[in-house]
Structure formats: structure tokens, C-alpha cells
Image (tube, rainbow, N blue to C red):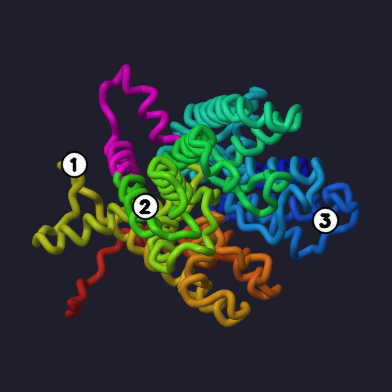
Amino acid sequence: MLKGFSLAEALSHNARRKNTNPTRLIVSSFLAVILCGTLLLMLPVSNRDGQMLDMLDAMFTATSATCVTGLVVFDTYTQFSTFGQVVILLLIQVGGLGLVTLTTFFNIAVGRRLGFKSLRLASESINLSDASQARALLQFVMKVAFVFEAIGAALLALVFVPQFGADGIFISVFISISSFCNAGFDILGRVMPGGSVIPYQSNPYVLAVISLLIISGGLGFLVWQDLSAYHRTHHLRTHTKLVLWITGWLLLLGTAGILFMEYNNPLTLGPMNLFDKITNAAFQSVSARTAGYNSIPLGDMTNFTKIFMSLLMFIGAAPGGTGGGIKVTTLSVVLLAVASVVRGRDEAMIFGRRIDHKTVYKSLTILMLSLFAVIAASMTLFYNTGPELNEVNSVFEAVSAFGTVGLSVGVTPLMNPFARVVTMLTMFIGRVGPVSLAISLSARKDSAAARRAVQPQAHINVG
């Protein structure tokens, strides 16, 4: 991991010296972390059997952890030693907050002077449009992250320490960080290998703590900064109001949908009492928003539920947080643009304010590129995996990878090497964002003069 931080320093130095695309540097930083994680997880000391881990398996695990996804080819507890689990935990923390974010924060903490280009790079990493606010927000990001993770670990320790003794402390810290970073990794394999939090499906306290951590990380740091200042400003940004409003509705609709479709399923919610049915439906609704924990066996859900949860996973969390997906704001802008066309308006509106065309174009671009990525991944997985991966399961796994969710119907360990590589690429695209990846790979960008030039208007008939 020290190599990753050293490379981040080099990337930041490069950003200061050259007019380098900051998006490309951010993408490179994630690749650097994945590479370091792969090398560390391959070491015999990282594995319980004391043997070298296959490079593809190590890379898959490192990619899943860095992209805060949670898809695994084997149970984390039974495969990895304590050292290996610590490596995975560090990958989750670095991947959740971003290597550039962490490096910039530590530079600020030790009193190093940061130039505008370094702050611009940091602002890009946390989805901040105004680079001048990057320093204050970075400090806030680190404070919020570690406070939530510490509180979550303390609350989970009340259950795990009595159950596991001293080991319960590390388990609590691991699951707290994994939950806040929306990663979905767990080390509960000593109870039920590969079972995620199914052993705690009748423990509403554990499900509630994990759910609150997931939601907290998924709301985004801009929202938390806005909420923390509300007692002074008595005002919330449009972004904050939209995120809170859409998140609330998605959680309610998700809970109701899962409860309705799985209510009588004898393999999932069917045998539970009403209270447990509601709490588990709510937990899966929260987790589907890019976290990756499951309290019921997902492979036994109905196909309708899998499709419904795929939609939730595709939407994901809010920008500027630890969650994935296309983001709730992207969906909102697209729907508002559609509504404006239906109503005969020239511009999309939200809370009495106009949404600029750039935002609408970017949202549509994200949606289309994301759909293309998911369709391509789904088809590839379907034709390169055994009969256990039908059409619905293929879509579910592909969306889970792209949305950096980590929920699985249990076929990830059965994938052949090519399907695993495709899944890794899908996780990486989902973490860095399809638009960011496209920009980073772009060899050419229009000049400022070309962007300002007024071109003749084209008239095209559509619809």
C-alpha cells in the first residue's frame, strides 16, 4: 500500500508540473492501488494455507475491494489470513475514499502547500466542481468518514465481542468500514462461509447499524457538509434536497417491492414473522443501493425480484460518496428532462430552478454509456458461463458489478477466467465512471476556441 501512496505522490507531482488530464490521473491511481493489492494478496502470508494465490484470483479480489464492490470468488475469512484481511480492508478504505483524496489530505495534514492544479485534481476525485473549496471539503470528508466508521464499529462490537471475544473487535471494525464504504465484504465465514449476514437476519440491531452505515456513505459528503451547516444557514442546496428526496423514495419503494414479491417465498422471506420480513426487505433495499450485503439467499429470489433489485443497483447512490451506480441525481435529471419535453418546456426544472443543458447532456451520456456497459457485460457473462447463469442472473451479476454493489446469486466462483476478467473490467468502469474512463482514454479534446465557435444549426426529425 505504501507503493500506492508513493505513486499517488508522483501523480500529484505530475499534475502540478504538466497540464495533465486530472481524470486520467484519478483512473491511474485506482489502477495503481489494484496492482499493489494484487501483489500483496498473492503472497503466502496473505493466505491461510500459506501458499501463493493465483494471480487472477488475487487481482479479482483486489479489484473488487478497491472498487468497493464485494463480489468474491471465495469466502474472505476462510481464504485469507489476518494479514490478507487487513490488506483487503485497506483496499476498501482507499478505494472508498479515493487514493488522491487520502494523499491530498495527508499532504494538508503535514502542512505541505498545495497548488491550484493539485486542488483541482483532488476536487475531481470527490466530484466537486469548485476547486477552491477542495481543501475544506477534504478535511470534512476524512472527519466524517472516520467518525461514522468509529461509531459503527463501537455499535457492532456490542454484538460481535460477546459472540467472538477479542476477535469481535476486528470483525466490528472490518464490517463498519466495509459498510460505510459500501463494499459488502465480510469476515463472518466462521459462522456461515459465503453467507454474508444471513446468520443475523433475525437480529434487527445488526441489520439497522449496517443499514445506517451504508446510507451514510451513500448520501455523499457534499450532502453531509450541507446538513452540518444547516443550523447556521437554515438553507439546503438543491443537490442536497434532491438526493434526500430521491433516496427516501427509493428506500421506501425498494422495501415495499421486495416485501411484496418475496412475502410468500418459502426460501427467502416466507418463513419469517412479519417484523423480520419488513426488516429484511428494508435491509435488502438499502444494500441493493451499492452495498452488497445480503440477509436472504439471493439465488432463491424470484426472477421478478432479481430484475427489480437490478434496477435499484443500476441507480445506485449519490455522487461524491462511497456508493456506485449511475447515481440518483443522474436518474432524476433524465426524468426531469423527459417531463419537460412532455410538458412542452424548453428547459428541465427542479424545485423552481432551471437545470442547465450541460448537466442534462452529461446525465444522458452517463445513462447511455452505462446501459451499453451493462448490456455488453451481461451478454458476455451469459455466453461464457455455465447453465446456472441464465439471462436474468447474467443481468443481475453484470449490474451488480457495474454498480459496484457486490450482490451475487452465487455464480461468481463458477465463472471461467474470461468471465472474471470481464467482471473486473465492469467493476472498474463502474467505480471510475463510464464518462470519466472515456475522457481518460480520449486522445483528443476540442480546444477552447472550438468549443466557443458557433456552428450552423442542424434540423433533424426525431420520434
**Magenta-span inclusion, residue 228:** yes
Instruction: Indicate the position of residue 76 as horizontal and vertical percent values.
Output: 72, 50
Q: Say which of marks 3 and 1 sits in front.
A: 3
Find the distance from the CA under tag 1 to the CA under tag 2. Answer: 32 Å
Q: Quadrant of the N terminus?
A: top right
Q: Magenta part of the protein: which range?
A: 221-248
Q: Quadrant of residue 113?
A: top right
Which residue is rendered at x = 62% and y = 36% of the image?
102
Q: Which mark is residue 351?
A: 1
Instruction: Indicate the position of residue 114 as horizontal and vertical percent values.
Output: 59, 32
Find the distance from the CA under tag 3 to the CA under tag 1. Answer: 52 Å
Q: Residues within 10 Å of mark 2 (few under 14, many from 20)?
A: many
Q: Helix, strand or loop at disc 3?
A: helix
Q: Is residue 178 left or right of residue 331?
A: right
Q: Residues within 10 Å of mark 1 (few under 14, many from 20)?
A: few
Q: Quadrant of residue 336?
A: bottom left
Rendered position, 410 above or below 290: below
Which residue is rendered at x = 34% and y = 44% of the image?
247
Q: Main secondary structure of the magenta part?
A: helix
- Report which residue position mark 3 lands on: 42
Whichever of callouts 3 and 1 sits on the residue coming sooner in the sequence is 3
Q: Say which of marks 1 and 2 sits in front.
A: 2
Q: Residues within 10 Å of mark 3 (few under 14, many from 20)?
A: many
